[in-house]
Amino acid sequence: MDGRLILNLSDNDKSYYLRNGTKLYYEQLRVAYKDILGGAERPYTYFAFVTLCSATLEASLNFIILNFCLNKYGPLKLREYYESYIGLRFKSKLHIIPSLLSEGKLIINEDNPSVKQLEMLITLRNRLLHNKETLETFDLPHLGSEIIDGNLVIPVSNANIEFQILVKDNPIESIDRDMCLKFGEALGCFKKLIMDAALTDTFIANEMLMLCSW
């Protein structure tokens, strides 16, 4: 689905076009996935791939919600309802869409491996894009130092000391080839079982979607 046309043939109102820009995201994602699969990696490749994956997922979720609001509320009230959904947290959008599109009949299957990978992707994306360093504290070993005539004096035996500084891992360091391939595969499942299904009115229970039991 490249886009939607809503034509008004009465000549007294506007017609509408809704572009599906996610197609470009998935095209780039396939190329990047094949590069990693084929071993064409650079120092920045994994970070860039994870960023592309998260951008593709968020763009997809936003478009699904936009298309849903257009179908349900029409073009004139689209913005009013769309903005109430688009402000949801990233992970919340993933979880709310199945229920939204199925009128409460379907929910996301949290035990599905692809769903778990997408949740990991969202968490990692937040850590990468909103990383905050903290001021760490550490303890020096006892030096036996003292103040003599206003000067700090340290015994010669303690002139060389060893100490340890513990710092948190940078989230970039956690990304590797295997993680990238799993994210790519999970997005492929998402596109087939959720994205495409949502846009073609074939939204039914599958590996990633399960019937609500209450």
Image: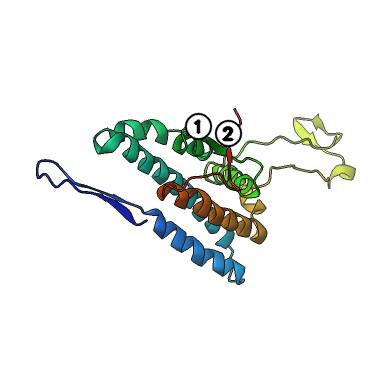
In the rendered image of this protein, does residue 142 appear above or below residue 193? above
Q: Residues within 10 Å of mark 1 (few under 14, many from 20)?
A: some
Q: What kind of element bears circle 2?
A: loop
User: In the rendered structure, are the residues bearing label 1 and label 2 in contact, judged by CB atoms less than 8 Å apart?
Assistant: yes
In this view of the protein, which residue sits in the foreground, 179 or 117? Answer: 117
Residue 176 image position (x, y, % from top left):
65, 58
Q: Quadrant of the N terminus?
A: bottom left
Q: Is residue 157 left or right of residue 116?
A: right
In the rendered image of this protein, does residue 47 appear above or below residue 112? below
In this view of the protein, which residue sits in the foreground, 168 or 136? Answer: 168
The residue that mark 2 highlights is: 212
Can residue 126 be seen in this snapshot? Answer: yes
Q: Quadrant of the C terminus?
A: top right
Q: What kind of element bears circle 1?
A: loop
In this view of the protein, which residue sits in the foreground, 170 or 103? Answer: 103
Q: Is residue 14 left or right of residue 63?
A: left
What amino acid is at disc 1? Gly
In this view of the protein, which residue sits in the foreground, 208 or 86? Answer: 208
- Count of marks, rendered view: 2
The tag earlier along the polypeptide, 1 or 2, is 1
Name which quarter of the figure residue 106 lies in. top right
**Could you say which disc has been placed on residue 104 in the image?**
1
Measured in 3D between alpha carbons, the distance from the residue under mark 1 to the one under mark 2, in whole angstroms, is: 7 Å
Residue 83 image position (x, y, % from top left):
36, 33
Q: Is residue 31 left or right of residue 166?
A: left
Q: Is residue 74 left or right of residue 30?
A: left
Residue 73 image position (x, y, % from top left):
31, 34
At a point 61% along the width and 58% down the height, the residue shown is 180
At a point 83% along the width and 38% down the height, the residue shown is 154
What amino acid is at disc 2? Cys
Q: Residues within 10 Å of mark 2 (few under 14, many from 20)?
A: few
